[in-house]
Structure formats: structure tokens, C-alpha cells
């Protein structure tokens, strides 16, 4: 199955990327391309990567998210993740990038919802 990444602008300058499937070395390029396409748009202030439909994330996926976050900051924007499944949330915690990607502790079930003012992404 080919990795799919849905992209939508939910408010001016605020985008949601929604990958569907595992993010691993076989699919990470598609995620990187989707991130870059959004970062290249004028006026981007925030990117939320909705991980609700990502059952698995390996080190290449973690690295892609970190590169995207660093590039976003360099352009005056932010990138964070939301709604990770428990296994994906655990990978982010174990690799100590959870807070860098906007998951400060998460909810009781190990997930993090979108901030107030944003509709829940699911």
C-alpha cells in the first residue's frame, strides 16, 4: 500500500497533514514531500501532523518530523503532532522528542489532542 498524506488548510496559515499508514523507511519520503509542500506555501504559521491513522513510526519517521519542525521554526512557523496511537506516542517519548513535537505529557491514554480553538482532528 502506498502511503497517503491528506493535507488541508483549516484556518488561514494553519494546516493539518494526516498520514495514513506506517511511517517507515519505505514511506517516509512521501511524508517529507507533503511536509515540504506545506512549508513552501506562503503564510504558513502552524502545521499539525495528525498521527491518528499511523500505527507505526520508525526512526526515519521521527527524523522526518524533527527536520520538518526545525524547518518550520526557521521559517517562523511551528510543527507539532497530535493524536498519536499509544505505540507511536511511546516511540516519541522513548526517543525524547515528544515535547519537541508538542506532546507535553499527553492525555491519560498517551495521546495529545489539538489545542483549544481547533476542532478535534478525528
Image (cartoon, grey):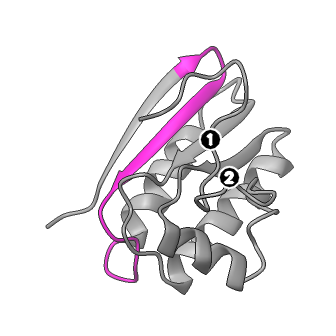
Left or right: residue 51 compared with residue 27: right
CA distance separating discs 2 and 1: 8 Å
User: Relative to residue 42, is residue 36 depicted above or below?
Assistant: below
In front: 14, or 107?
A: 107
Q: Residue at the left extreme? A: 1
Q: Is residue 11 magenta?
A: yes
Residue positioned 69% across, 49% down in the render: 80
User: Relative to residue 89, is residue 38 depicted above or below?
Assistant: above
Left or right: residue 88 compared with residue 11: left
User: Relative to residue 40, is residue 26 depicted above or below?
Assistant: below
Left or right: residue 28 compared with residue 72: left
Q: Residue at the front extreme? A: 108
Q: Which mark is residue 113?
A: 1
In the rendered image, which quarter is residue 98 located in?
bottom right
Left or right: residue 121 compared with residue 79: left
Q: Which mark is residue 107?
A: 2
Image quarter of the N terminus: bottom left
Amino acid at each position: 500500500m502506498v502511503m497517503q498524506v491528506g493535507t488541508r488548510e483549516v484556518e488561514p496559515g494553519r494546516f493539518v497533514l494526516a498520514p495514513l499508514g506506517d511511517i517507515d523507511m519505505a514511506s517516509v519520503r512521501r511524508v517529507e514531500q507533503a511536509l515540504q509542500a506545506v512549508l513552501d506555501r506562503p503564510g504558513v504559521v502552524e502545521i499539525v501532523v495528525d498521527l491518528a491513522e499511523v500505527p507505526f513510526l520508525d526512526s526515519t519517521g521521527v527524523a522526518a518530523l524533527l527536520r520538518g519542525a526545525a524547518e518550520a521554526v526557521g521559517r517562523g512557523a511551528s510543527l507539532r503532532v497530535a493524536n498519536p496511537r499509544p505505540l507511536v506516542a511511546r516511540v516519541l517519548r522513548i526517543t525524547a522528542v515528544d515535547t519537541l513535537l508538542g506532546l507535553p505529557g499527553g492525555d491519560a491514554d498517551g495521546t495529545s489532542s489539538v489545542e483549544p480553538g481547533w476542532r478535534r482532528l478525528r
